[in-house]
Image (cartoon, rainbow, N blue to C red):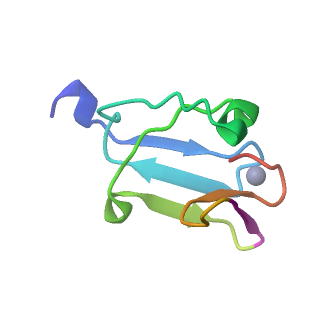
Amino acid sequence: MAANDTPLRSSCHCGAITITVPRVPEEINLCQCTICRRYGVAWGYYVAKEVKVETKPDAVTKKYLWGDRDHSFNFCGNCGCV
Ligand SMILES: [Zn+2]
């Protein structure tokens, strides 16, 4: 297993939502659109079936859609992490 094939696991600040991806992303997108600048995010992309999302029983996720509504920004309803 190469170093970049090590699964990465992270959670929101309150720990209600955990995401596991199979490896370091091949590219990082520092999008400078109006919303990504405000979030201060760096995006890595994966095929949806590669991403494991786990939520605690009381977790609430919220979604923000804008523009052509084909992309959503999903975040923890408790701590607000994207
Ligand atoms: Zn949270």
Image location of residue 57, percent across then percent down: 71, 73
Q: In front: 34, or 78?
A: 34
Q: In front: 49, or 35?
A: 35
Q: Reply above or below: 57 against 37.
A: below
Image location of residue 17, percent across then percent down: 65, 57
Q: In front: 63, or 70?
A: 70
Position of 5 with respect to 27 (left or right) is: left
Position of 82 with respect to 50 (left or right) is: right
Q: Quadrant of residue 48?
A: bottom left
Residue 47, visible in the rendered structure = yes
Answer whether residue 49 is magenta in the image: no
Residue drawn at x 39%, y 48% is 21
Residue 59, visible in the rendered structure = no
**The furthest residue to the left:** 1
Q: Reply above or below: 79 against 48.
A: above
The N terminus is located in which quarter?
top left
Residue drawn at x 68%, y 47% is 82
**The furthest residue to the front:** 68
Position of 4 with respect to 67 (left or right) is: left
Residue drawn at x 17%, y 29% is 2
Residue stretch in magenta: 58-66
**The furthest residue to the bottom:** 57
Residue drawn at x 71%, y 50% is 15
Q: In front: 8, or 61?
A: 61
The number of numbered badges drawn on the structure is 0
Image location of residue 40, percent across then percent down: 68, 29
Q: Reply above or below: 11 against 54.
A: above
